[in-house]
Each structure stands twice: as C-alpha cells, then as structure tokens.
Image: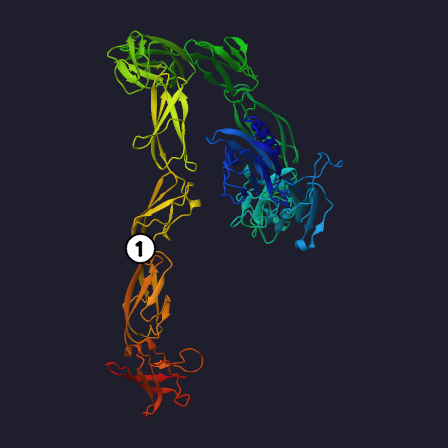
Amino acid sequence: MKRIFYLLLSLILFNTVSANNIIKDSVANINCNHDGFIFTEIVSLDTNVFSKWYLYNDSIWEQIDTSNQLIVINNNQYNSDSLTTEVCGLYKLEIVDVLDSLIEVRQYNVGCKLSVILEQEIIICNNNTGTINAYITGGIPFGQDTALVGGEYFQYQWYSFIDTSINSILLAGTNDFIDSLNQSYYYLIVSDSIGCIDTSEIIEIKPPEKLKIVDLNLTDASCYQSATGSISFSFNGGYKFDLINPYFYYLVSNSDTVCYRDTSGYSANFFNLTINPSMNSLHPDSIIIDSLFEGNYQLIVSDSVGCLFDTAFMIYEPLPYQLYVSSDTLICSSDSVWINIDSISGGLLPITYKWIDSNNDSIYVSNGNYLCVINDTLHNCIDTIDVEMTSLYDIKLDVNIGNISCFGDSTGFITIDSIYGGVKPYLYSGISLNNLSSGDYTISISDSLGCKSVDTISVLEPLKLQSNIFITQLACHNDSNASVILAYSGGVMPYEIYWQNSLSIDTVNNLSSGIYFYSVIDSNQCELLDTLEISNPNQLSVEFINYSTLLDCFNGITAIEAVVVNYDSSYSILWSNLDSTNITSIGAGYSSVFIEDNNGCRLVDSVLITQPDTFRIVEFILIDTICHLGASAHVVLDGGIPPYTYLWSTGEIDSMIFNIQDSICWVIVSDSCGNILIDTVFFDPFELVTAIIYDNITHIGSVEIDFTSTGGPFSYTWVDIIGSVISTDSITSNLCEGTYFVTTNDNTTNCSVIDTLIATFYLPNGIVDETTTTVLSDSDLWGNPPYSYFWDNAEISAHANICSGSHWVEVTDADGCVVRADFDIDPLLIVLDPAEFIIECNLENLDVDITADAIGGTVPYTYAWSNGSTENSINFNLSPGNYSVVVMDNNACTEDTSFVIETISAECIPNVFTPNGDNINDTWNLENTFFYLDSEIRIYGRYGKLLFKSIDYAKPWDGKDENGNDVTEGVYFYHINIGHDFDPIRGSVTIIR
C-alpha cells in the first residue's frame, strides 16, 4: 500500500512543473549488496540553476543537507546532482534559479532493504496449536510462480528449536505463514531474487497453562437431608479475567445451578479465600463452596477466553433415623399406658433422645400421637419421629354438619349418621342439633364397657361480606377518565356484581364526576348494597403579573411572572423562549406559556408585548483612497432611541472617520437602549506590497512584488546608508554587509514604498580564530578574495602577535567590503602546584614536584625556570633558596612568578621506618630538596658508634651500617648539620623489622 501511495504521489507531482534541465536520471533500491542511490545529470548546475534534495518524512518534505549521516549528497545542498542513501522512501529533486524560483521538479522512490517481521496469533486454550504470520518489506521478489496466487513471491525457510537455535529443525512450511504449531521456539529466514537474506526475531509459541484443580477437599453432609456438605479447592491455569474475578465458576446439580461466580455477582454459598491475588496463571485461586445437600455435582470453570474445565464429584449424607419402641395394650381411648424407647438406628453417633414433653425415654400416655426428639450432639442434627397410640376399643362417630349460609344467621345443624367401634349399646348426650349459630359443639358417647369418647364439632359460617373500593379519581377538570375497582371479601365466591342496577364486572372505566350505586350477591345469595362518589377537580389556570405591555426600547425585554393555580401538587412550565421557570424575560410580540401539572392537566396561554420603531442604518457616504491617503466614511442612522454611539474597526467613535487604510471597514452602532447594529463597507485602496530577498552566500539582494492593486509598471532605486544610489534594478549584487534602502515606485500612480535590507555574510565560524589570533583561510570567508587585513596593533598580515586584552581585526575583500571582528584574549596567568609561595618540608610533603599551569594568552606555552629547566613539571634536586619561572605564549607574551624552598625542619623528620624488604617504608625518607649540597647527616648507635654518614642525603639510609650489614631493631640517634648558619637538628629514629 505504501508503494502504491508513493507512485500515485509521484505521478501527481511530476506534472506540476516541467522543464528540461534534468536530462538523465537513474535510481537503485537499497539491498544487501549496496546502498540506494539516485544519479542525475543537470544542465548548467551551479551556474544558472541550483538543486535542492528533499525526503518525504511523516507527511512533510524535509530538505537534505550535508549534516545527514545516512544520506550523502555529492556536493553542498544547493548544487548536488546525485545522492547515496541508507534510508528508503520517496525523494524529491527541485531545480531552481538564482531567485529560488522553481524550474523543474522530479520525484524518485528508493526501495527498502529486505526485512521480515513476525506476528503470532494468540493460543486460546492449552490444547490448541499456534500460528505465525510473516510480513515482508523491501527486497526484490521472485517473478510469477504458477503454484502461488498473487504473482510475486519470496522464499521462506521456517525453523524451530526447543533449547538453543544451534539445534534448529527446518520445517516443511514454505509460505508466509505457518500453523498447527506446538510449544517451541520459531524463526524465519526469507530470501529475495538477488540473494538477499533476512532472519526474523525468535518467537516462542507457548500455550497457556492447563486449567486444573489442586488441593481438592470434599466434606459430606453431617445430617440427613441437610445442606451441610462443602467443597474446597485451588484453581489455576489459562487466562484470568482480572484480580477480583480470575475465573467464572458454576456448580450444577440435577440441571440446577446451585452455586456461581461471574460478572453478575456470586451466590451466598461461594467464598474466595485467595490471599494477594495475581494475574499470573500459576497463582492459585482458593475457593470454598458450602451449603451442599447430598447428591451428584458437576463443577464447570471458564477462563477469560472461554476455555472450560469440567469435573464431577459426589456429596454423601448419613442414613435416616429409625425408632424402636415398646408399650402395654391400650383398651379404651381414655386409658393410659407406658411407652418405652428401646433403640434408635441411623444418623451419626453419639446421639441423645427423649419424648418432646419429657426428659425421659418413657412416658405414660393415652390414645394419640407423640413425638420423639433425637439429637446428634457432635453435628447438632435434630430430628423428630411420630409414634401413634391406638386403643383396642376406640369409639368413632360419623356426623353430617350443616354450616350457615350468610354471616350472622342461625341456620346450622348437626346430624349423627352412625356410631361404631367399642361395644354396643351406646349412650350419648348433647345440646339441640338444629337452628345452630356458628360455634363449637360437644357430643359425649359411652359404650357397654364404660369406654367413653368426647368429640367437638364445629358449625361454620362465611366471613362477613365486605366491599373494598379502589377509585382512580379524575385527573383534570371535566375529564371522563375516572375508574373504579370493586373488590370484595367474605361470603362465598363467586360473586355477582351490579353497577347502577346492571350486571357488571369488577372494574368500571371512563367515568365522569357523580354518585354511583353498586351491589354484590355471593353464591349463597347473600347481598351487599352501597354507593360511591367521584369528585370533579378545579380547572388549571394562570395569571400574568409584574410585566410591561409596552417596551421602552426597540428589541428590549420585560420581566414577567406566571402565577399558576388549581394544580395538583406540582407542575412544569415552558415559555415560548424555552425558559422553564415561572419568572422569565420576553421581548416584543406574542409570547406563550405551556403548563402541565402532576396529573398531566395542560394549559396554554399567551400575552402580547409592543415596542418602539426599528433601529437601522440608512446609508453610508464614502470617499475612496488616493495613494497612501486613506478613505473616508460617514454612517447615517434612523429609528431607535437617540443618542447613538459609534465604534469603527479603526477605533474611531464618531459618525464620520478619515484616513481608512484597509479595503474593508466595519462599524458598530448602538442607541441609548443598547440596540446594536453592525455593517461593513468596502474600498479599493492603493496597495503595493513588496518583499526583500537576500542570499547571504551569493550576496545578491532583490525586491519582488507580492501584491499590487494596479499591476505596475514599477521602477526601483537602491541607496546605501549614506544615500548613495547603488542600483536602479530590482536585483543588486556584490553587496557588502550593511543597511540598504530600496524604493519601489508604481509608475501608474506615482505611489511608492520603501524597504530596508540588512545585508550580512554567511560566516558560521566568524572571521578569526581567537585561539591562534589568525584570520580564517579564504575558503572559510565569504568568497570574494583577495583579502587584506588590519589589526588594532596596526599589523596587516593574516596573523597578529597580540597579548591579552580587547582586540579587533578588519578584513577587506576585493570589492572593498569590510568585516570587523572584536574579541578578547584572556590574561596570561601562572598557577603553581604546590600553590604556596613558600614551600616548607613536612611529613605530608616529602616528594616535591613543582608544576606551572598556564592559562590565558594563546597556546602553546614555553617555560623557563631559574634553574635552567624548560619542562613544565619538574622534580627539584635543588637546595633551599629562591626560584622563579617565566612562561611565554605563542604570541611571545610572557608572565613570571617566584617561590621559596625552605630548609628542612625537625617536624619534617620521621621517627620510625621498617627496612624489612617489603618495599614499604624501607628507608628513612628525608626529602633532599630541603638540604643544601653540603648538608651532612650522621646516624649513631646507642653507644655513640657512627653507623651512617651522607652529604646532601642523595641516597637515603636503608637501616644498614657502614659495612652494609643490617642493624638490629631499636632506637638510633641522628645529627643533621644543615650549615649556612642554621642550627643542627638532633633526634632519634626507631627501626622496626
């Protein structure tokens, strides 16, 4: 696509300018054998025409100069006809004349070096394979290949390795992609038709970690039919969603999801125990799921790319409790016997048990049902088992009950159909069994054995028939949208509903205000009669207050307030100006307001406001320009409310303005009411816009006409700073540095403009090398030799021997142009090291090298020491005394300084040394610089024997006697006779071996 873009852009720009200065050209792309290049042949290059090279970079053309290290042009940036480059892309060559006007332009595309980039497709799940795609740029492809669709192609060699690329394996793929890849390292070598090769980066195909469960723990339900089972596990692998929800979890039992966690949230029995969560796939997600019943479960886990993990497990529970009891025989239902709990099976031990109304395992009871309570004390599982006690002779009674039809009646009855059980005959007693009200009635029956049975029989009645009326009142005045819902309770359904004496349903709609009758009859023909009323609300209305019907000014406004009455709880208001508050501002004309209350009741009303006559501009009176004298304009107004104010684009504030220099002028006028009008007038002023062009290399100045209102013709006059005419053409050459004035005259109007040119020479390095006080070579000056020189010390050569201070030099070319340079030479200074004026001997200064560091002046420097040495840094093998050094720079400027070397002192003499042959402190080190040539040093033993003697101490004492034998460890005494009227120095020195 990039290549096509370059070609299209080239075709477009090739046709913009055409000429014949470029008579030959050729282009070579960048490849593995050579850089890219563009060779051209240009007629009259560097004489009548010049060249400019550009590189298209990021949507802009950047000119190429000699500073670019990757693109080399064969001359300077204005007269180069060819280039070599390491940068591929689109290049442009412009041919211009001496005025930089474009003559010809051509573009060239330099192709890129062969390069390959690999991109792998992400492996979604652990059991998937990978794919790598190759993208080729640059290079020269092979020609048509009938085996491939697309024509041009490259040669591809795919390799893989596991541990190191030394053991690479050539793969079968020969296309620009390779798929079905397992975990390994891969790279590609691509070749083009001229043998260039590029090797890609190494890409690792690595599937995600396998989704897996670790540390799975199952806990069975502790109680029968209880949700006390649980599962705990850790999960990792795949691609996590985020830190909060790494994976989605679903626990399914019998096609029902009993636990979950996903983006919608999580169930109450899901708990995440992960500490310090991480997006690393190997960092486990710790989970507990509780409240599980006995059964088969399926755990499904999904990662962020949809890879699934599926496993199944079973939660078990204890067996149900089984109760075993024993008792005596119960004869009559009214008798009592003992019931004993013999044993219990099922559940989990240990357990406790008892009868529900007793703390014992035995109870004394009659005919009936009794509960045994069983408790698993370890898991707190509590269960009950019902035990039924039945007598041998249980008297039974069958009755027919007649319940009451309507609430409050006495129409109930009880009929005994049969008595059985027990031993006949039976006796029974009770109240009258007819015309009964609602309530409970007791019948007592006994048989021939004396067994008794007492039964309680209930006669029922329906609830009181009642109405619950729900009325939706009218929302707005005179509406017909009220509704009634007739809801009933009590009686016996179904009901028949009558509205206004007509059979109806329980909902009545579209009612107006008024009083309505209704009734209801249940299935027992019990009836209820009643009335209801629907009221009519007040009509919504608005009143306008606090406003003016006539405005003081044209386009003025007035405040107005709308007072709304008879609305329901709240309302909204909207004016025609889109304001939604009760108080607003409106202008002249009709303004309307729309009001809607909380019930949707609506009202539209309007108000009329009038205003004075329209404020307007009647006309402009114009006088056009003459030369540079501006135009004049006068604005005439009408209407509005005087006085008027004016503001012109020139800043004037009167109705008339003068000397308008622009071709367009606007005015803003307003009356005392603040009404504003804006209008614009147009002129045809004289205009002459010129531009000065100056080339600081060729020293050519020119004036060009950028814009003119007349079209000329024009004449030109160039004068220098003193008023001398130097040219009467639009172009002038051989300009010296200085200020020039050029007058361009329009001969049709005799109007003119004056421009100023400040001419400078292109001297990036100046004209003088200050370090050598020498004027730069002719090739580094402004290109008009021969040159003459004049220095501030009257020297006239290119070099001047001058010392520190402020200086100047003037250089004059063949045309008499003078360029002056002012500069300063730093004073010549000497800094001694050591820096002390008096050099004294001390234990930290036993080896003395004197260095004279010179700064300032002109390098290089020479040195002359008072001892005759000419080195910069010297080691003084001298006696104490006064010394000096003289430094001379390259211009024979000199500077001197002096210093003093003191004699040795007692503080400078070490009191111990270790002559043991380890080259550390092996001698008694005394700096002989601080001795005179005739100073004498003597060493004595403890008994006064002379062991060592030296004049000038040129060779230090190494701990040996005069015979060359090592002396023993201990204290020795020295006597130093300095001489030259200095007192001797005496003391001791210790030898440690």
**From where the camera sits, is residue 243 visible?**
yes
Circle 1 sits in a helix, a strand or a loop, which is it? loop
Q: Quadrant of the N terminus?
A: top right
Q: How is the image coloured?
A: rainbow
Residue indicated by mark 1: 803
| Relative to 940, residue 317 above or below | above
The local crowd at label 1, few if under 14, some if 14 to 19, many if 20 or more residues have their Cα within 10 Å, is many
What is the x, y in percent for residue 728? 37, 26
Q: Quadrant of the C terminus?
A: bottom left
| Relative to 861, residue 561 above or below | above
| 181 vs 387, nearest the viewer | 181
What is the x, y in percent for residue 66? 50, 42
What is the x, y in percent for residue 738? 34, 36
**From where the camera sits, is residue 128 visible?**
no
Where is residue 673, by image quadrant?
A: top left
What is the x, y in percent for residue 157? 70, 46
Where is residue 12, by image quadrant?
A: top right
Q: Furthest residue to the right?
A: 146
- Tell whether 198 sits left or right of 610: right
- Tell whether 81 sits left or right of 470: right
Where is residue 941, by image quadrant?
A: bottom left
Callout 1, which amino acid? Cys
- Tell whether 564 sits left or right of 47: left
| 352 vs 987, nearest the viewer | 987
| 978 vs 508, nearest the viewer | 978
Count of labels in the image: 1
